[in-house]
Image (cartoon, rainbow, N blue to C red):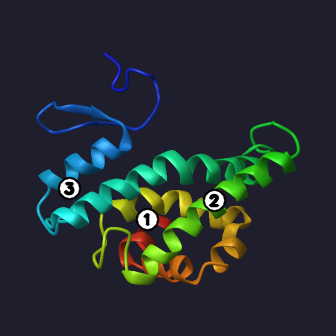
Amino acid sequence: MERHPFGVIPAFEDDDGFRLYESRAIIRYLDRKLPGTSLTPSDVHAYARMEQFISVEQCYFSPSAMKVIWERLFKKLMGGGAPDEARISDGLQGVERVFGIIEPVLGKQQYLAGDGFSLAEVTWMPYMDFFVAAGGAELVGKYPNVAAWWERVRSRPSWKKVTGA
């Protein structure tokens, strides 16, 4: 049996043989199972905000950011030719809309779910990192609260370890 029924990654198999696929399901599972500080807020409002911003990432931010990331970073490497500037523009507009929505939220709290780092940040981090690498730093900089949040998040020792920074 394939680990992922759609034949893609990620897929996870625990020591007891339990199998799970889809990154957001895997991180929720691991957060509940592993010892240490939970990244799922116990406060019901913070928990709801975490879930909301995980959804915002998946439904609005990542699809737009991936247009820019694909066109600027991966397309040529994958033999797809020159970047499609219209697709980049469309992606940037989508990201800008998302940043416009999270900017005031991050003006009131340190992180997406509240004042503590949560799984919401975990889902955003890889896409933000690639988006900035694809030339998105200028757009991030237009939103001071988003920029400050991203600096807090990307400066975490755990993220530096992941990225080798």
Q: Amino acid at mark 3?
A: Asp
Q: Nearer the viewer, residue 30 or 88?
A: 88
- Label 1 to label 2: alpha-carbon separation: 24 Å
The amino acid marked with disc number 2 is Val
- Residue 9, numbered circle: none
Residue 51 location (% of width, % of height): 31, 54
Pointer 3 residue: 31
What is the x, y in percent for residue 161?
Answer: 41, 70
Q: Considering only vertical position in the picture, is 40 above or below 10?
A: below
Q: CA distance from mark 1 to mark 3?
A: 17 Å
Label 2: state its secondary structure.
helix
What is the number of the mark on residue 95? Answer: 2
- Answer left or right for 64 relative to 13: right
Mark 3 surroundings within 10 Å by alpha-carbon count, few (fewer than 14), some (14 through 19), many (20 or more): some
| Residue that carries the numbered disc 1 in the rendered image | 162
The answer to whether residue 154 is seen in the rendering is no
| Mark closer to the observer (1, 3) | 3
Q: Earlier in the sequence, mark 3 or mark 2?
A: 3
Measure the C-alpha gap from mark 3 to mark 2: 28 Å
Report the mark closest to the observer, 3 or 2.
2
